[in-house]
Amino acid sequence: MNWLLVLLGGAVGAPLRYLTDRAVQARHDTVFPWGTFTVNVAGSLVLGTLTGAALSGAVGTGVQLLLGTGLCGALTTYSTFSYETLRLAETGAVFLAVTNVAASIVAGLGAVFVGLTLAQAMFG
């Protein structure tokens, strides 16, 4: 049954990633990968919140599998982040490539911390 929860979460997360990426990128006239950045930070926030809720006992394993492993696993994308960063560097946009790496790490970790803190305030 656990695999079904992961499958269902992934079935929502993957198209959500694609649609969010396209919607965000369409609003920015730049080569910077704002769409991937957005889904990765959003997924980090959701996962931080879910982790905080799980640590406080507010959610169980099923929710963790559905939202954490399934949804966030399909929503976030390290492979696309890596590919887009490499493409930026290869096309001469080295500053944007470095900015993408630094901003993704800082914003992703920040989002996890905010989510964790929010969940602890709500459920702790």
Image: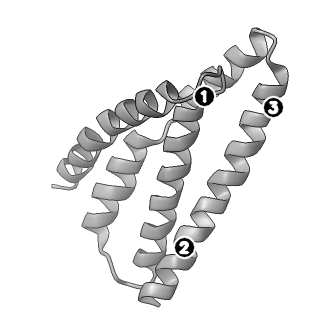
The kind of residue tagged 3 is Val
Numbered disc in front, either 1 or 2: 1
* Residue depicted at x 79% and y 17%: 93
N-term-proximal mark, 3 vs 2: 3
Residue bearing the label numbered 1: 33
Residue bearing the label numbered 2: 116
- Secondary structure beneath dot 2 equals helix
Classify residue 70 as left or right of residue 91.
left
Residue bearing the label numbered 3: 98
The kind of residue tagged 1 is Pro
Quarter of the image where the N terminus is located = bottom left
* Residue depicted at x 28% and y 65%: 63
Q: CA distance from mark 1 to mark 2?
A: 26 Å
Residue 124: percent from the left, percent from the top?
Answer: 47, 90
Q: Quadrant of residue 33?
A: top right
Q: Quadrant of residue 29?
A: top right
Residue 34 vs 58, above or below: the answer is: above
N-term-proximal mark, 3 vs 1: 1
The kind of residue tagged 2 is Leu
